[in-house]
Image: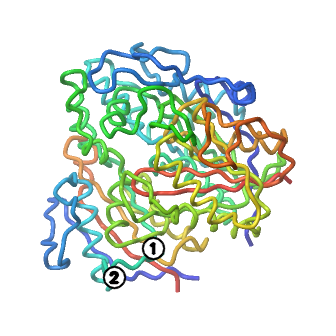
């Protein structure tokens, strides 16, 4: 018999601050994405970045670990048998950057190091695993965590993800021309690319109910179309959406809101709107994205968005899509909007064609 | 329901790749750009899927891919980052950057065979290689996320001493439920 899975605790760290600060920042319409010449480079001279209390060129030893620890402060004590799933997407980047610059090697050099650091922080037994599904990493990890608890394999799962914006990812996204030379404008008709952001998140899932938020469904799919670009028809994401809704035992018209991946790239945002419109055909759904406020936080983005979706359900409010001026579709929210609904979905898509959708329900 | 193994194949520690022309009439267009991790993963997948009678026929199949690796794409990461170091990043290699995420190797398989099921990479335990991936694959099958899963492990790093000394090669298995 399948067990219910509850999202009992969440913590995030973004350019706007911790979970409450990030949530309030969204409602206040603030953005941590700053456009400037963040460092001397010949590839993309100016761009918008959302950094967590630091300058891009500032050398901070073990910054990934610092970000993880700061985020975990928002979680509190956990049962010793909590299974940890680490879902950062490029956990070795800091080590590779430091090696090349003859700087000291950081404590977290790999996904395994990060997972062990999380277990050590809480004094856990050490059981866990690492997941990498590019920018959908922490959404996929949440799906797996939900499945493990539902199946009775574990009683408690902590999903943790963090990614730091360093030269490794900056140059890469600039080289594939995915970054804007200003700040990102998710869902805007004039959008020109994404803005990167430091981010960390932790989600404590459990079979024991200590909150009113249930993780009720998930879907994971592959576009089978291209390794770095989304499918043009949205069919892969639509498949994942339908899977999540079916798993929750709901109909599409019972879902009232969609927190999209909304990176601000031309093709991603269009693909998401196509997918949403192909699934939610009977009743319009409210769509928003948060990356105009905190940038694209890579592997952490899914867990950050899940934590904020729980805030939407608890507060009865949906945030405006910050930095979207002229939306591509009328369902994209430009103002904070009362949200009396009980069901919200969020999605992430990433390199390799992966899509992951998580459905949360307020009980 | 019980898990059923449909096919499996492996590549030994010397990373000698099979002649793919024996299995495919045409290689993926990007094959020449694949990094070593992607080449080994792709080649092992081709042999496994050929044994199971699964073709790259353009028809979408609800098959997932879950692969474990500890060293993952480390060697490609280093090669990519070296391209960023000259002229303030002006010569950064976009193709190398694409392969700094191990799931891209899975994406290449998904694109070639039109696999639309879940794709994810997980860690790998040297004492039980592929075990974590296999358990995740079984969970996804039991949850009805896909009809079959290509799962196993791939370790190719020549720069990370810990993995190179303990485990190199690849082994993939196609599983389903019976």
**Residue A352 quadrant:** bottom left
In the picture, the disc for residue A258 is none
Residue designated by label 1: B63
Residue A271 % position (x, y): 52, 55
- Using the image, determine if residue B57 lies above or below residue A140: below
Q: In this view, does A15 lie to the left or right of A61?
A: right
Question: To which chain does the residue with label 1 belong?
Answer: B
User: Mark 1 packing: few (<14 Cα in 10 Å), some, or many (20+)?
Assistant: many
* A62 vs A263: above or below: above
At x 51%, y 49%, the residue is A136
Disc 2 crowd rating (10 Å Cα; few below 14, some 14-19, many 20+) is: few
Q: Which mark is residue B54?
A: 2
What element does badge 1 sit on?
A: strand
Q: In which quarter of the image is residue B5?
A: bottom left
Residue plotted at (70% across, 55% down): A155
The structure residue drawn at horizontal position 79% and vertical position 52%, both measured from the top left corner, is A208
- Picture coordinates of residue B122 (x, y %)? 44, 54
**Mark 2 or mark 1: whose residue is earlier in sequence:** 2
Q: In this view, does A82 lie to the left or right of B49?
A: right
Percent across and percent down for residue A140 are 55, 54
| Residue closer to the observer: B99 or A162 | B99
Q: Which chain is home to disc 2?
A: B
């Amino acid at each position: 018999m399948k067990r219910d899975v509850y999202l009992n605790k969440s913590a995030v760290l973004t350019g706007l601050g911790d979970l409450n600060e990030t949530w309030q920042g969204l409602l206040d319409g603030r953005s941590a994405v700053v456009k400037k010449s963040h460092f001397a480079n010949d590839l993309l001279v100016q761009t918008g970045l959302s950094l967590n209390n630091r300058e891009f060129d500032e050398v901070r030893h073990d910054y990934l670990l610092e970000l993880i620890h700061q985020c975990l402060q928002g979680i509190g004590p956990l049962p010793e048998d909590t299974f940890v799933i680490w879902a950062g997407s490029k956990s070795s980047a800091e080590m590779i950057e430091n090696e090349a610059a003859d700087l000291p090697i950081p404590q977290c050099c790999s996904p395994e190091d990060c997972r062990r650091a999380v277990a050590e922080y809480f004094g856990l037994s050490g059981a866990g695993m690492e997941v990498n599904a590019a920018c959908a990493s922490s959404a996929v990890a949440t799906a797996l965590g939900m499945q493990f608890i539902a199946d009775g394999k574990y009683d408690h799962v902590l999903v943790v993800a963090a990614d730091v914006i360093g030269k490794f990812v900056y140059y890469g996204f600039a080289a594939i021309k995915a970054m804007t030379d200003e700040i990102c404008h998710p869902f805007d008709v004039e959008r020109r690319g994404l803005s990167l952001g430091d981010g960390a998140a932790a989600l404590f899932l459990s079979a024991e109910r200590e909150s009113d938020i249930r993780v009720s469904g998930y879907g994971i799919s592959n576009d089978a179309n291209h390794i770095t670009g989304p499918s043009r028809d949205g069919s892969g994401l639509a498949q994942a959406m339908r899977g999540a809704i079916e798993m929750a035992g709901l109909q599409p018209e019972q879902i009232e809101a969609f927190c999209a991946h909304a990176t601000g790239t031309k093709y991603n945002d269009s693909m998401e709107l196509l997918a949403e419109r192909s699934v939610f055909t009977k009743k319009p759904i409210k769509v928003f994205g948060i990356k105009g406020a905190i940038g694209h936080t890579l592997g952490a983005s899914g867990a950050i968005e899940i934590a904020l979706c729980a805030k939407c359900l608890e507060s009865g409010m949906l945030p405006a899509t910050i930095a979207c001026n002229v939306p591509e579709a009328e369902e994209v929210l430009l103002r904070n909007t009362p949200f009396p609904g009980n069901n919200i979905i969020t999605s992430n898509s990433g390199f390799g064609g992966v899509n992951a959708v998580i459905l949360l329900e307020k009980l | 329901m019980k898990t059923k193994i449909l096919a499996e194949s492996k590549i030994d520690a010397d990373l000698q790749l099979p002649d793919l022309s024996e299995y495919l009439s045409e290689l993926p267009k990007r094959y020449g750009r694949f990094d070593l991790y992607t080449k080994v993963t792709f080649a092992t997948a081709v042999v496994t899927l050929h044994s199971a009678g699964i073709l790259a026929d353009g028809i979408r199949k609800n098959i997932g891919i879950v692969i474990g690796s500890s060293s993952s794409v480390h060697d490609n990461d280093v090669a990519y980052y070296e391209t960023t170091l000259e002229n303030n990043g002006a010569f950064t290699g976009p193709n190398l950057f694409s392969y700094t995420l191990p799931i891209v190797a899975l994406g290449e398989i998904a694109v070639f065979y039109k696999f639309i099921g879940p794709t994810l990479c997980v860690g790998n335990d040297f004492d039980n290689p592929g075990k974590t991936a296999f358990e995740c694959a079984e969970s996804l099958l039991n949850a009805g996320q896909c009809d079959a899963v290509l799962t196993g492990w791939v370790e190719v790093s020549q720069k990370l001493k810990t993995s190179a000394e303990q485990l190199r090669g690849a082994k993939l298995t196609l599983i389903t439920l019976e």
